Image: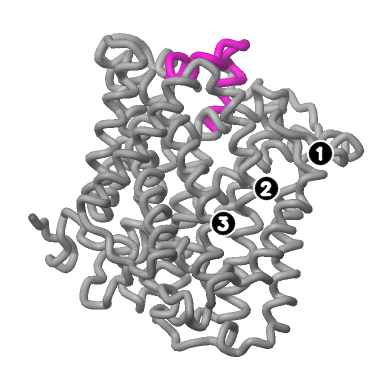
């Protein structure tokens, strides 16, 4: 079954998985990258993330500034990963085999799978609430309905994901324009912006919330740009992905900040109901519930699709083949969404605090990976990867790349004294006035160390650049 696109040749049901996309099958336009990432961010979880900055004690004005700074910093990191998609024609995490080895890449990939699981589960909770209200059923039934939709969309794959992204962008813009008009109508936004009490800990919390939101996309952002022609401008790819993600997330988080500030403590625990309540009742409420659920379809499908890519990458690394049958793909997707749904059903009544701790703690594991991957791609390998060797444990990248693994591990550990979450708080946090600066250290220290180790690597078969894949 096929449906014409810009080139009239791309199938609606995706045939490929983690294998290299040949130039003859490349398709798509940059505007689809912009709409995909804008649609992925115009959704309820981003609203909740922004609201956390105020719910946890931040000032409205300074929270908005902090969130924007975090969006720009984190968005730049994720957009740099997106540029690798057209150049390599590969999913994001398979390129980690260059830095960690064909087997060693399983270490960060397993952690990425846990990230997808967590994000899918938390998103499913909110979507279940929206569908429950929309159809007049329980939240549990809503969660199960949403899971079925995600399985179907993920099985169709790349093109359907981009189509959903375009639809989510249009629907999201309409819904957010309406919600902002209601916020302005029922609340005194000017007064909220005038009440200012600056706190470094609250300000940097806002920066960290937004930065972690963006950086967490890094491990799969290239999955959705890998079908673009290799001649696609890197700068334009960077801007299309980065602007779509930053603008979408900032719009959603601004709404979250204002809604939480107006709520007088009524936001936490009933996030979906409160947001919809701003828009009214009856038909309008039903449309908003639908918009919330549909907005989550995009990002939850990205998470499920990315999970499949990660599992396939781990398995293929050890068995030496990148061929994945449709039945294997279907089984993996059902398993992934099934586990995430089970987690959602168990944890649906303690969402907000668990989510805040989860996304902040993620930084400890993904900023070092981003640092290592980006430094290698742009400054060590200089965009030149030996694609066939990525599937060969006996090839130029080897089974285990010890320097890369050690730098990554050290990058995780060096952040521990500076992390501040409910899951864990490091000893340096109190001395810094409660400020969490772990993600900054997690970017800078591994970047420097990996560059030094990689440049000094004496194994020319592992580190010397191969042919340019673009």
Note whether 435 is above or below 3 in the view shown. Answer: above
Q: Is residue 277 left or right of residue 259?
A: left
Q: Residue at x 36, y 50 (%)?
A: 308
Q: Residue at x 56, y 11 (%)?
A: 266
Quadrant for residue 9, please give it: bottom left
Residue 46: % across, % down: 50, 35
Q: Is residue 185 visible?
A: no
- Label 2 crowd bin: few (<14), some (14–19), many (20+), radius 10 Å: many
Quadrant for residue 49, please give it: top right
- Label 3 crowd bin: few (<14), some (14–19), many (20+), radius 10 Å: some
Helix, strand, or loop for circle 2? helix
Q: Give, as a single range, the part of the protein colored magenta.
A: 254-275
Note whether 378 is above or below 286 in the view shown. Answer: below
Q: Is residue 298 left or right of residue 209?
A: left
Q: Residue at x 49, y 14 (%)?
A: 270
Earlier residue among tags 1 and 3:
3
* Residue 107: image tag: 3
Helix, strand, or loop for circle 1? loop
Is 279 magenta? The answer is no
Q: Is residue 272 left or right of residue 444?
A: left
Q: Is residue 115 visible?
A: yes
The kind of secondary structure the magenta stretch mainly shows is: helix
């Amino acid at each position: 079954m096929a449906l014409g696109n810009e080139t009239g040749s791309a199938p609606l049901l995706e045939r490929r998985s983690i294998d290299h996309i040949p130039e003859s099958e490349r398709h798509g336009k940059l505007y689809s990258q912009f709409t995909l990432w804008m649609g992925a961010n115009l959704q309820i979880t981003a609203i909740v993330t922004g609201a956390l900055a105020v719910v946890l004690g931040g000032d409205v004005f300074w929270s908005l500034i902090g969130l924007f700074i975090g969006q720009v910093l984190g968005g730049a990191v994720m957009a740099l990963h997106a540029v690798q998609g057209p150049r390599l024609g590969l999913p994001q995490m398979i390129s980690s085999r260059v830095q960690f080895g064909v087997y060693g890449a399983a270490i960060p990939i397993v952690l990425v799978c846990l990230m997808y699981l967590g994000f899918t589960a938390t998103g499913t909770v909110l979507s279940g609430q929206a569908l429950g209200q929309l159809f007049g059923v329980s939240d549990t039934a809503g969660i199960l309905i949403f899971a079925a939709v995600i399985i179907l969309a993920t099985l169709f794959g790349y093109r359907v994901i981009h189509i959903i992204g375009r639809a989510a962008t249009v629907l999201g813009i309409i819904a957010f324009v309406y919600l902002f008009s209601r916020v302005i109508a029922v609340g005194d936004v000017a007064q909220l912006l005038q009440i200012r009490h600056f706190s470094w800990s609250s300000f940097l919390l806002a920066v960290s919330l937004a930065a972690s939101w963006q950086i967490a996309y890094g491990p799969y952002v290239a999955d959705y740009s890998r079908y673009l022609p290799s001649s696609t401008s890197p700068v334009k790819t960077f801007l299309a992905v980065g602007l779509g993600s930053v603008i979408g997330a900032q719009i959603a988080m601004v709404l979250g900040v204002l809604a939480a500030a107006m709520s007088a403590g009524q936001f936490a625990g009933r996030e979906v109901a409160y947001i919809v309540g701003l828009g009214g009742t009856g038909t309008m409420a039903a449309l908003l519930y639908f918009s919330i659920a549909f907005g989550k379809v995009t990002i939850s499908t990205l998470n499920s699709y990315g999970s499949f890519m990660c599992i396939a990458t781990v398995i293929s690394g050890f068995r030496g083949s990148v061929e994945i049958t449709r039945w294997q793909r279907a089984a993996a997707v059902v398993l992934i969404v099934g586990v995430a749904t089970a987690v959602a059903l168990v944890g649906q009544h303690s969402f907000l605090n668990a989510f805040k701790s989860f996304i902040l703690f993620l930084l400890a594991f993904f900023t070092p990976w981003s640092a290592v991957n980006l430094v290698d791609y742009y400054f060590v390998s200089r965009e030149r990867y030996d694609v066939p060797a990525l599937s060969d444990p006996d090839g130029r990248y080897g089974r285990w790349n010890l320097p890369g693994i050690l730098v990554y591990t050290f990058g995780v550990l060096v952040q521990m004294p500076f992390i501040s979450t409910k899951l864990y708080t490091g000893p340096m946090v109190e001395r810094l006035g409660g400020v969490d600066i772990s993600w900054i250290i997690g970017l800078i220290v591994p970047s420097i160390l990996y560059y030094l180790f990689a440049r000094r690597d004496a194994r020319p078969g592992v580190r010397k650049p191969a042919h340019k894949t673009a």
